[in-house]
Image (cartoon, rainbow, N blue to C red):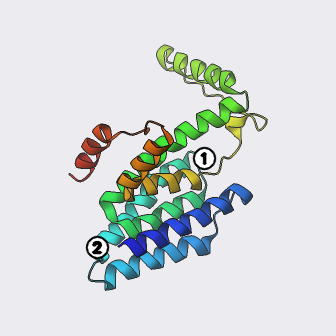
Amino acid sequence: MLIIYSLLIISLLVASVYDAATHRIPNWLSLFILVLGLSWNTFSPEGLGLKDSSAGLGAGFSLMLLGYIFGSMGAGDTKLMAAIGSVVGFNKVLEVVFCGYMIMFVMAIVFITVQGDLFKLLRRYKVFFYGLVTGVMTYQKPDSSEAAGRRMPLAPAITLATCYVLYPTFCKLGFSFLGVTLWLPSECADPIRAYLRF
């Protein structure tokens, strides 16, 4: 499994570089990961089996499709997560999606804050939640000049989430070495993992 996971992480690092540079994730890269996952899990004695691999593919695609429908992520991000699901299977892809959304949220807030548009975002959501309370639903879309209206590359967040799920011990050691408290400590992560595994 170590070789397959390492190939997956290397592929995701390539996807992150592409996404950061061009705001696109190449289809051939997602296809490579997909073929790798389905082949390994179907034909290797160490694999998860075709059923779990296909379930992971479907779960990764479905959970990211919501973000694509609401316009918060691109089709490339959805295809990439589906491909990851084919490698790691159903249970682990749920963890990757959960961690991925958390990292994306933090990255988005940091990005918007650095661009100086945090107060505009808070004002828009204040109007939205006030509308919910009063029964007058209004949502103001961010204009293209705002940071919230621009597309942010999400492949780096997906890569970080995948690394954390596949190599939690390594990630904790790395964060400890840097003197940083991990954003999802084991006492939080372990019950989540137990719940996601049913």
Q: Which mark is residue 71?
A: 1
Asked if residue 64 lies left or right of residue 23, the reply is: left
Label 1 Cα crowd, 10 Å radius (few <14 / some 14-19 / many 20+): few
Vertical placement of 102 versus 27: above or below?
above
Asked if residue 119 lies left or right of residue 179, the reply is: right
Circle 2 — which element?
loop
Image coordinates for residue 61, horizontal then vertical, percent: 45, 60
Residue type at tag 1: Gly
Image coordinates for residue 181, horizontal then vertical, percent: 44, 36
Residue type at tag 2: Leu
Asked if residue 185 lies left or right of residue 115, the reply is: left
Circle 1 — which element?
loop
Image coordinates for residue 4, horizontal then vertical, percent: 42, 74
For the residues labelled 1 and 2, the Cα–Cα distance comes to 33 Å
Vertical placement of 54 versus 94: above or below?
below
Image coordinates for residue 194, horizontal then vertical, percent: 23, 48
Asked if residue 67 lies left or right of residue 57, the reply is: right
Asked whether residue 6 appears in the rendered view, the answer is: yes
Q: Earlier in the sequence, mark 1 or mark 2?
A: 2
Task: Place residue 113 in its image quadrant.
Answer: top right
Disc 2: which residue: 48
Q: Are marks 1 and 2 in contact (CB under 8 Å)?
A: no
Outermost residue, right direction? 145
Vertical placement of 34 versus 168: above or below?
below
Asked whether residue 57 appears in the rendered view, the answer is: no
- Depth order, front residue of 107/174: 174
Q: Residue at x 76, y 38 (%)?
A: 144
